[in-house]
Image: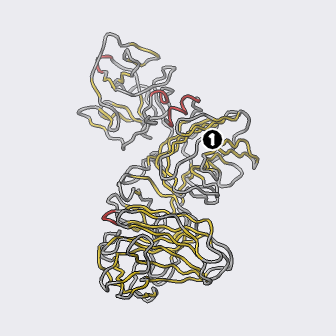
Amino acid sequence: MNPIINPQVLGRGLSVAFEAPVSVSGAQGYVSGLPSVTFATAATDAFAGGSKYSYDGRLVCVDATSALPSGAVVLGGFAFSETGALCITTGAQSSAVFIQGIPVRQDGAVHISMGFAFDFLQQANPLMPSGSSLTLSVSANRTFIASTGVVTLQTSNVWPLSYNPQTLVARGRPSWVGATNLILQSETLDNASWLKTRSSVTANAVVSPDGSTDADKMVEDSTNNSHYNEQSITKAASALSYVYSVFLKAAERGFFRIQVLDGASNGAFADLNISTGTISAASGIGGTPFTSLSTFIEAYQNGWYRANLIFTTGTNTTLTCFNVMANSLGGVSYQGDGTSGLYAWGSELKQQSFTSPYIPTVASSVTAPADTASMALPSSFNASEGTCYIEFIPSVTQTTAPVVVSFDDGTNNERIQVYLTSGNVPSLFVVDGGVTQADITNSSAATNFAVTKVAFRYKANDFAICVNGGTVRTDTSGTLPTVTTIRFNGVAGQQLNGWLRKCYYYPVALTNAELVSLTT
């Protein structure tokens, strides 16, 4: 159900926020993003609390200007406050217009006040409270997926809208921890940083996932053996988690092995069928194989796939990444013909246990700092009670308690936040004066790469959280913190590692039934 114009929720009259930027047509008298407007005066209409309603409970809005809040204006027959809130006023019945789907408060009050809303799925900029702005830290070293499916470098401190690279459906605004690509010359396999064994590289052979003709072709020689290229790095003498990834596209060869070994020939690998976009489970190699193995593959445009091998090393201080051609699934030793091969681009090795957006490199490793987004709370925030709806897509099940949204004072001593447990279960955490007041774990886990909807309320001795229309979990004891900021990560980072889609705030504590309705 649409959480913005859901009459069961906004029937309490708290927020008018739009799925599209507000625009008004004077000739037709409608607000874009809302259902159609028709002129009507029915015999069954009634008046309640100074406002006119149709027989089915919908509001008839009239064109008067009396009793408007300071700064309000009338556009196309509709009154708007300076924050963009729609003001419902009384007036002559002859000038009434009928607006479908506009709810009002149950007590019949004539003004619908606005909390605030962020619609991160808006293309140009996130729809947010009028006169407010987000403080952003967005790295120009990290890429995102544009609406065309092209892998695109971010612009510094501009929060991009990222899309599914295959379906081109908008995912949301990215929220990622800081990361470093340790591979050098990530897009130039012909460079000397890559050691070629029984193979060669044809540079700039085909259009890459970034839309440029800069993807190289790996070409096998004519020997009966393995055919590959490799690059090594030095690591600390401890067990560390990594993910090695590479973009691949089939040519004459449609099979591939992604492999990583340490200096003692221990490691892990996985085999791919590039033509079908499938990857095997990871297998260990050597006397002390790598542990915590997993694989992931994702389809991109024009036959490209991004393959990921995730693993935890031993204590050896050398790590070598291999791109290995094959003539069948697992068939890495075969008679080459001297001309056949496949396309590869965008190799990456990161010290983390999950896949994340690609970071290109040239002569040295490149770091992309963590994404952060925050805003000072506007005057519409209610310190005594309120409800927040947040919609997001996680990409990985983590153990670091990532924070989806936080209301805080810049410290961990005063905060109301939604975080994910180690099982990706959304939980409501409230701290006042450094003392935990509520820590409510919901029963429904978030699914990676799927939309999750969470609504929570806060009020003294009344906290609740609901996930995806499921059971509402509550806590009936606790005080409220003093907060000044909303942020879409934790005070100490704790990024989601996924995408943020929507955040709506209502300055009252909605009921359990309304929390369910919001998240259904």
Above or below, comparing residue 58 to residue 440 in the picture: above
- Residue 78, given in percent of the width and then of the height, sits at 34, 31
Camera-side residue: 345 or 144? 345
Q: Is residue 314 left or right of residue 111?
A: right
**Quarter holding residue 283:** bottom right
Q: Secondary structure at mark 1?
A: loop
Q: Quadrant of the N terminus?
A: top left
- The residue shown at (64%, 47%) is 483
Task: For label 1, count other residues whose C-alpha is less than 10 Å away and answer few (under 14), some (14-19) or many (20+).
Answer: many
- The residue shown at (63%, 45%) is 427
Residue receiving disc 1: 442
In the rendered image, the residue lying farthest to the top is: 43
Camera-side residue: 463 or 47? 463
Q: Is residue 170 left or right of residue 109?
A: left
- Residue 73, given in percent of the width and then of the height, sits at 37, 35
Above or below, comparing residue 435 to residue 115 in the picture: below
- The residue shown at (56%, 63%) is 177
Q: Is residue 89 left or right of residue 442?
A: left
Camera-side residue: 261 or 11? 261
Q: Identify which amino acid the numbered label 1 is placed on.
A: Asn
Q: Is residue 173 left or right of residue 401?
A: left
